[in-house]
Every structure is written in structure tokens, then in C-alpha cells.
Amino acid sequence: METPLELSFNNFTPSDAVEARIRKRVQKLERYFERITSCHVWVDAIHASQAPGRSRGRLVSYAVRIELRVPGSDLAISRKPGDINAHKNIMVAIRDSFDAMERRLKEYVSKLRGVVKSHPEPLQGKITRLFPEQGYGFVATTDGQEIYFHEHSVIDVDFAALAVGMPVELSTAEGESPDGPQATTLRPIRAQQLARQP
């Protein structure tokens, strides 16, 4: 870093272990991105006198705020990420805030490198079997799978409107059924929208 780490502690005196943990997590951030120009970390002990409806003087939780300056941007974690009920433990509060900053820094680095998350194309196929009385059917997908679907997974039309051979688009979930993947949503599409024939 171009400027030394700045630490601020409010309403309490930190232990050496607390300072060491923060310094270690900052070093980890620098391993993700070595061009961090500055880092400021504030740790506040929030006491009951500062929180409405609480008995006075009792420690309620810790809040950790982090600001990183990087080329062309400032990254900040100012809210309480994670399970705030666990933030009576200062180490948990530090962990949650630095984990959130790591995610934010990774997103920044990905954008800087031009990496864009690609969203996979929805799975497509044709209905091969229907069991109207039982309320389910099967789809042969363009990638060679046979997927079970229930009438409750059908969107945009009624289950009764489906027919064998109809092209569909679906989302699946693994582990929903002992017989393999199962459609979580299924909707009919026009034949022209079908990317490949199953």
C-alpha cells in the first residue's frame, strides 16, 4: 500500500489479538490485489446506551467498517454483513466484514480485467411423455437428458395445455428426486426458439 493501514477503535481498547487479526486480513486483501493505495478500518463497540430499548451500559455488538482506495474507485463495507446477532464476538464481526470486502474486491478486479459473468443459456427440449391424470411428464433435452417435471413447475400456461412434442425451456435442480434431475420451472416456447433439436 502507498499509505500505511489506518486503524480506529471507538468505545473500547483493542487487544493485540484483535489488531493482529485485522492486519492479517488486510495482508490477505493485498494478495488479491497488490495495487491497493490505502485502507482504513474502523471498529466500534456499540453499547446499550447507544441502542434504543436496551439496558444502559451493556455491550450490544461490534461494527466493523472498511474503506479501501484502489485505482479509480473507493470500496467500502459500512453495514453489518453476516449474522449480526453473532457480532457480540469481535472476531466474528471482523471476519464477516473482511469476507464481504474480499467479495467486493474480487468483483472490482474481475471488472478491471474485463471478466464478465456469463449466464448459462436455459436448458431446452421437447416433451416426450405426459401423464395428465398423475400431473407429471418428461422432457428430452437438447443435451441428451430426460428430465422429469411436475404440473406445479409449469409456468405461463396450464398443465392441460401441454402436448407431446411441444418445445419447452426449463430450469433444473439436482438432488430433488432420487430418479435424477427434476425441472423446477418449465415453460413452452415457439419451435423457432429451440436452439437445437433433441
Image (tube, grey):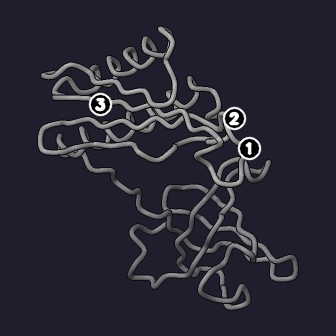
| Mark 1 crowdedness (10 Å alpha carbons): few <14, some 14-19, many ≥20 | few
Residue at the limit of the structure toward the right, as seen here? 133
Question: Please, what is the three-letter code of the amino acid marked with disc 2?
Answer: Arg
Question: Please, what is the three-letter code of the amino acid marked with disc 3?
Answer: His
Determine whether 11 is above or below 196 in the image: above
Q: Residue at x 36, y 35 (%)?
A: 66
Q: Residue at x 33, y 50 (%)?
A: 117
Report the Cα–Cα distance between label 2 and label 3. Answer: 27 Å
- Secondary structure category for the residue under label 1: loop
- Nearer to the camera, 8 or 196: 8
Report the Cα–Cα distance between label 3 and label 1. Answer: 31 Å
Determine the image quadrant of residue 91.
top right
Q: Which residue is mark 2?
A: 58
Position of 144 with respect to 37 (left or right) is right
Q: Which residue is mark 1?
A: 55
Q: Which residue is mark 3?
A: 40
